[in-house]
Amino acid sequence: LNRRLAEFGTTIFAEMSALATRTGAINLGQGFPDTDGPDEIREAAVRALREGRGNQYPPGPGVPELRTAIADHQRRRYGLAYDPDSEVLVTAGATEAIAATLLALLEPGDEVIALEPYYDSYAACIAMAGGTRVPVTLRPREGAFGLDLDELRAAVTRRTRLILLNTPHNPTGTVLDRAELTAIAELAQEHDLLVVTDEVYEHLVFDDAEHLPIATLPGMRERTVTIGSAGKTYSFTGWKVGWVTASPELTSAVRSAKQFLTYVASGPFQYAIAEALRLPDSYYDELRAGLRRKRDLLGAGLRAAGFEVYQPRGTYFITTDITPFGEKDAYAFCRALPERCGVVAIPNSVFYDDQTAGRGQVRFAFCKKDSVIEAATERLSGLR
Ligand code: PMP
Ligand code: GLN
């Protein structure tokens, strides 16, 4: 293994899901729903398979039906107009979109500002591209995580090439608001930076939170690569359908890298997700309402069990503080948790450059059946 990758080991999601399988523990670690998405979308995939649509290599940029549906979705939800032919690219999940974007846009030595705690693939992909990550840490304030704009401004140097955003943010559940995004947009324009924004949780926002794509802000469309995914929105994380929307120049750059990573993926699933993107607004309303209820169910159970809970305004994760248990090492805590009480969770410490920073934080997923959440919190209540 080369030096660029050696520091990353095995992704925490594989490690913790394997632990859940080995021990039979309830898996609130890796973020995937335990109920599949809509039947009619599954049937659409079966139909595509039977009718021989996508069983052989689809076009490299993605099938036209899906690219058009993605463009329509961005227009309908956000008023963003993208040309399906030159400004939309289908990828093998958001994971490939992130990799291809960073491989395409970074020169060796370029600095990437990323919100920390960061999704683990960001650090690995920045490293594979020869870049340097510069974390800007979201910090707890008033029971939730927030961004310090002065810290962000101070992170910009002559070498900064791009800002990598993630909103709604995994693992903290932070949703960047208009004022924060406006400040980031101004910074990007002042220093001529690109913005790459991972919006895979765009539909999972709660309470009064609203998802605002930074590409909608003045002057940003031309310098922003927006990344989306069907995995979270339609509860088909195994299908690995993701996408990029950006200017023709940026889309073409990302496509240059993508063609040598997978060329294409997910033939029949692309047709099914094209149908999913046309589901009525009521689908998203129900998804959100169901998940908000589950968030509250898990949050109440975790509090009752003695965890300190940071209230998420988006995603399907809750970050907790385990220091009330006298615990100081999230990784050790998570490794021992299946033995102690039959539950698997994710230590946020692995999402920090300085792992001591997240030592007290553990993430739980709530995209699970109510009975599973209840059983898990019942087990966790034995911790004290
Ligand atoms: N970005 C974030 C923030 C994620 O949490 C995930 C996990 N789904 C991904 C990207 C990867 O998405 P996909 O499964 O579509 O590759
Ligand atoms: N995004 C998912 C999570 O944060 C995991 C995806 C993966 O396993 N790479 O849990």
Image (spheres, grey):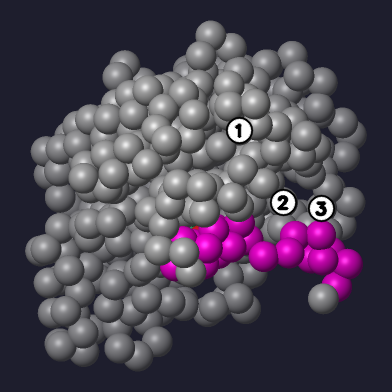
Q: Is residue 99 magenta?
A: no
What is the span of residues highlighted in magenta in the rendered image?
2-21
Q: Is residue 74 visible?
A: no
In this figure, which residue is indicated by the disc labeled 1? 361
- Residue at image position (37%, 41%) is 379
Looking at the rendered structure, the secondary structure element under dot 3 is: loop
Give the amino acid at mark 3.
Answer: Gly
Whether disc 2's CB lies below 8 Å from ligand 1 is answered no
Q: Is residue 12 magenta?
A: yes
Viewer-closest of 297 and 4: 297
Q: Is residue 257 above or below residue 209?
A: below
In this figure, which residue is indicated by the disc labeled 3? 131
Q: Which mark is residue 123?
A: 2
Looking at the rendered structure, the secondary structure element under dot 1 is: strand
Q: Is residue 368 left or right of residue 259?
A: left
Which one is in front in this view, the residue at disc 2 or the one at disc 1?
1
Q: Earlier along the polypeptide chain: callout 2 or callout 3?
A: 2
In space, the residues marked 3 and 1 are separated at their CA atoms by: 27 Å
- Residue at image position (38%, 54%) is 26
The x and y percentages for residue 222 are: 56, 40
Q: Is residue 302 left or right of residue 319?
A: left
